[in-house]
C-alpha cells in the first residue's frame, strides 16, 4: 500500500510541476494586451529622456509627425510638433 502511494507521488509531483511551469511560460508569452507575434504599430516612441524624479520628455512618431511630449505622474502634455524627416535618425547616429 505504501509503495503504491510513493509511486503515485513520484509520478504526480513532476507532472504537476511541469504543468505549472508550462502555464507560467504560456502566461508570460501571451499576456493580456499583447498580440501574438509582431504587428505594425501606428504610434512609436522614438526617444525618451528622464527629467527629474518622475517626469520625462519623449518624442513620439504618429501619422508622419514627431510629437514632443512631457510625461509626468498623471499628466501628458504636448510641447512641440514637427514633421518626420526620412533618414534623420541615421544622420544623427553617424556623428
Image: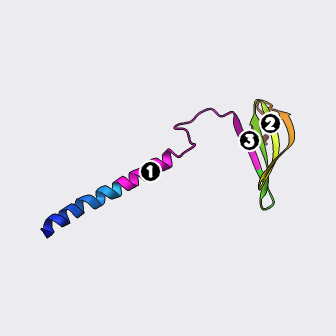
Left/right placement of residue 13 relative to residue 25 reads: left
- Of the numbered discs in the image, which one, if any, rests on residue 66? 2
Label 1 sits on a secondary structure element that is: helix
Residue range (magenta): 19-48
Quarter of the rendering containing residue 88 = top right
Q: Which of 87 and 36 is in front in this view?
A: 36
Tell me the residue that label 3 is attached to. Answer: 46
Single out the mark in the foreground, 1 or 2.
1
Label 2 sits on a secondary structure element that is: strand
Left/right placement of residue 32 relative to residue 46 reads: left
Distance CA(mark 2)–CA(mark 3): 8 Å
Single out the mark in the foreground, 3 or 1.
1
Q: Which callout, 2 or 3, points at the residue further toward the start of the chain? A: 3
Q: Which callout, 1 or 2, points at the residue further toward the start of the chain? A: 1
Name the spot of residue 93 as percent of width and height, x first: 75, 42
- Of the numbered discs in the image, which one, if any, rests on residue 57? none
Quadrant of the snapshot with the C terminus = top right
Distance CA(mark 3)–CA(mark 1): 30 Å
For label 2, the crowd category at 10 Å Cα-Cα, with few meaning under 14, some 14 to 19 and many 20 or more, is many
Residue at horizontal 76 percent and vertical 40 percent from the top: 60
Q: Residue furthest right?
A: 80
Left/right placement of residue 89 relative to residue 26 reads: right
Tell me, yes or no, whether the two marked residues, 2 and 3, touch with CB atoms within 8 Å: yes
Magenta stretch encompasses residue 71: no
Q: Work out whether 87 lies above or below 17.
A: above
Q: Which of 2 and 82 is in front in this view?
A: 2
- Of the numbered discs in the image, which one, if any, rests on residue 25? 1
For label 3, the crowd category at 10 Å Cα-Cα, with few meaning under 14, some 14 to 19 and many 20 or more, is few
Tell me, yes or no, whether the two marked residues, 3 and 1, touch with CB atoms within 8 Å: no
Residue at horizontal 72 percent and vertical 42 percent from the top: 45
Name the spot of residue 29 as percent of width and height, x first: 49, 46
For label 1, the crowd category at 10 Å Cα-Cα, with few meaning under 14, some 14 to 19 and many 20 or more, is few
Amino acid at each position: 500500500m505504501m509503495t503504491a502511494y510513493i509511486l503515485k507521488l513520484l509520478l504526480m509531483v513532476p507532472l504537476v510541476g511541469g504543468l505549472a511551469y508550462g502555464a507560467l511560460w504560456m502566461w508570460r508569452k501571451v499576456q493580456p494586451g499583447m498580440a501574438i507575434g509582431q504587428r505594425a504599430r501606428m504610434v512609436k516612441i522614438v526617444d525618451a529622456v528622464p527629467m527629474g524624479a518622475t517626469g520625462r520628455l519623449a518624442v513620439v512618431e504618429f501619422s508622419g509627425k514627431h510629437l514632443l511630449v512631457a510625461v509626468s505622474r498623471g499628466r501628458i502634455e504636448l510641447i512641440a510638433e514637427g514633421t518626420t524627416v526620412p533618414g534623420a535618425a541615421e544622420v544623427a547616429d553617424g556623428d
